């Protein structure tokens, strides 16, 4: 099998309404879609994105800059392809858009490998489960009123979720406490509740807020301080009874290694785009396992399910509905769990009508 064509498309998927965290203002996700066509008629698919489509053309150019490392190759040589891309990006660095480009190439190659074998990737990787815990992450934004959040939380429970995440990091700690209190009162003690500060707090603020929120039995406090402040994150972790989760903003297994060695987290949260693809995600999960640290994947729910199905220390995946309109298939949620697809490859394929509807000119 040979890759005969490296095809990209740009799309922008709008949200129903603008949303915000403590540090983000968001209205859409702009995506670069990658399709690797082969001489056997199989197509490997993947995508990477930018919030609001900002700098999307720059991401697109970065990805197409590695096209020569892919066309004419057998996707089964995904390790050699990945190493060639890694070596070539040395002058521009192994973070940012260069790693996002590697993610798209690596994931599309693995999708082809699974399709050629007519097997779902979690089976090829060595399956450990057929479904995984998830939490609703597509709501309870800082831009919403408490009443809106309470109503949305009820909707998540009706949809089958048994866990959900609320954003914190308001200008005043009292406001965050009242938001969390209202959601906990609304959902009761048996629904898991997580909180994400989106790096908005200082160490002292995070410790104070974390202690105030301990009464509400949060499953974790996510990204309490700036992602690069590993010493500060470790200090917050030591000060709180609540688990601390982080990792989504760091790159590759080397970034994960730094977090783990700093003892900065109780739960490691790698992001597929920033980690460098499915190959690097598997390495990062193994690294976390060697430190006895569980993993919960960030965003990219559809394409992360194969990792969750093969890595024993992956305790959950973040359910983010942003990219669902792009796919023919939908995620199945029952009793707080997502089914790992049994379809070949990643188990998800791009919807042609949606691609045309959201497509951008370039």
Image: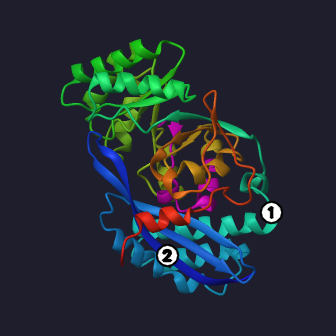
Work out how far the residue at label 2 is from the one at label 1, CA to CA, in angstroms: 24 Å
Q: Give the range drawn in magenta.
A: 265-287
Q: Which mark is residue 118?
A: 1
- Residue 268 colored in magenta in the image: yes
Q: Which of marks 2 and 1 is nearer the N terminus?
A: 2
User: Which residue shows up at 47% across the image and 63% down it?
Assistant: 48
Q: What element carries label 2?
A: strand
Residue 58 in view: yes
Q: Is residue 74 left or right of residue 82?
A: right
Q: Which quadrant holds the C terminus? A: bottom left
Q: Position of residue 41 (x, y in %)?
A: 72, 78
Q: Which residue is drawn at 47% across and 65% down?
A: 100
The disc label shown at residue 8, or none? 2
Q: In this view, does 163 lie to the left or right of 182?
A: right
At x 37%, y 40%, the residue is 231
* Residue 47 in the image, given as x and y percentages of width and height: 51, 64
Q: For this view, does 230 lie left or right of residue 277? A: left
């Amino acid at each position: 099998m040979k890759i005969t064509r490296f095809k990209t498309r740009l799309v922008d998927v709008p949200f129903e309404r603008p949303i915000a965290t403590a540090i983000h203002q968001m209205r859409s996700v702009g995506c670069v879609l990658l399709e690797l066509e082969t001489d056997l008629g199989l197509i490997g698919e993947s995508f990477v994105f930018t919030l609001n489509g900002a700098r999307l053309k720059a991401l697109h150019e970065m990805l197409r800059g590695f096209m020569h490392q892919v066309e004419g190759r057998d996707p089964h040589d995904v390790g050699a392809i990945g190493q060639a891309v890694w070596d070539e990006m040395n002058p521009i660095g192994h973070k940012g858009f260069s790693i996002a480009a590697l993610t798209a190439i690596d994931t599309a190659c693995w999708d082809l490998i699974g399709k050629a074998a007519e097997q779902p990737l979690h089976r090829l990787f060595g399956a450990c489960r057929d479904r995984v815990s998830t939490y609703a992450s597509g709501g309870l934004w800082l831009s919403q009123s408490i009443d809106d959040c309470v109503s949305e939380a009820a909707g998540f429970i009706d949809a089958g979720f048994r866990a959900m995440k609320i954003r914190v990091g308001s200008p005043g700690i009292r406001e965050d406490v009242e938001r969390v209190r209202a959601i906990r009162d609304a959902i009761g003690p048996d629904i898991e509740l997580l909180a994400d500060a989106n790096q908005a707090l200082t160490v002292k603020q995070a410790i104070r807020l974390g202690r105030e929120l301990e009464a509400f039995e949060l499953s974790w406090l996510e990204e309490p301080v700036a992602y690069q402040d590993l010493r500060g994150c470790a200090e917050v972790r030591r000060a709180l009874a609540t688990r601390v989760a982080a990792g989504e903003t760091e790159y590759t297994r080397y970034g994960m290694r730094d977090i783990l060695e700093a003892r900065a987290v109780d739960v490691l949260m790698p992001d597929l785009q920033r980690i460098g693809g499915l190959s690097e995600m598997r390495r990062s999960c193994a690294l976390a396992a060697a430190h006895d640290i569980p993993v919960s994947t960030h965003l990219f729910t559809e394409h992360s399910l194969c990792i969750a199905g093969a890595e024993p220390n992956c305790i959950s995946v973040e359910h983010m509905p942003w990219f669902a309109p792009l796919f023919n298939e939908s995620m199945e949620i029952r009793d707080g769990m997502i089914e790992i697809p049994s379809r070949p490859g990643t188990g998800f394929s791009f919807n042609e009508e949606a691609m045309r509807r959201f497509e951008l000119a370039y």
